[in-house]
Image (cartoon, rainbow, N blue to C red):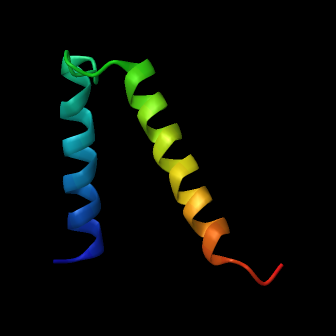
Amino acid sequence: MSFHSTAAQLVTLASEGGEHGGNHESLEPLVTGGGAFVILMLLLWITTRFNRDR
């Protein structure tokens, strides 16, 4: 598969996705963002616990 055919398929896929508005009915932006924030803070806390050389 060449780069040009792959790019053409991705452009076609992206143009078809715009018909539905892009948002899923069950996804709440506040819950999604809050969940991502909590996960990132947990990863930051874990990283700082293992990095004792500072």
Which residue occupies 27% across, 40% down? 14
Q: Nearer the viewer, residue 54 or 24?
A: 54
Taking the view exactly as shown, the residue that stands out farthest to the right is: 54
On-image quarter of the C terminus: bottom right
Q: Quadrant of residue 8?
A: bottom left
Question: Residue visible at 52% across and 58% down?
Answer: 43
How far across and down, in percent of the image, does residue 27 sit?
27, 22
Examine the rendered structure and indicate whether residue 21 appears above or below residue 18: above
Residue at point 16% right, 77% down?
Answer: 1
Please report the residue visible at 19 percent of the width from the left and 54 percent of the height from the top.
9
25 lies left or right of 3: left
What residue occupies the far bottom of the structure in this picture? 53
Residue 23 in the image: above or below residue 47: above
Quarter of the image holding residue 17?
Answer: top left
Q: As displayed, is residue 34 above or below residue 39?
A: above
**Residue 36: % across, % down:** 45, 40
Q: On the rendered structure, is 21 left or right of 54?
A: left
Is residue 28 or residue 50 the one in the foreground?
50
Q: Indicate the position of residue 25 as horizontal and vertical percent values.
A: 19, 15
Q: How many marks?
A: 0
Image quadrant assignment for residue 24: top left
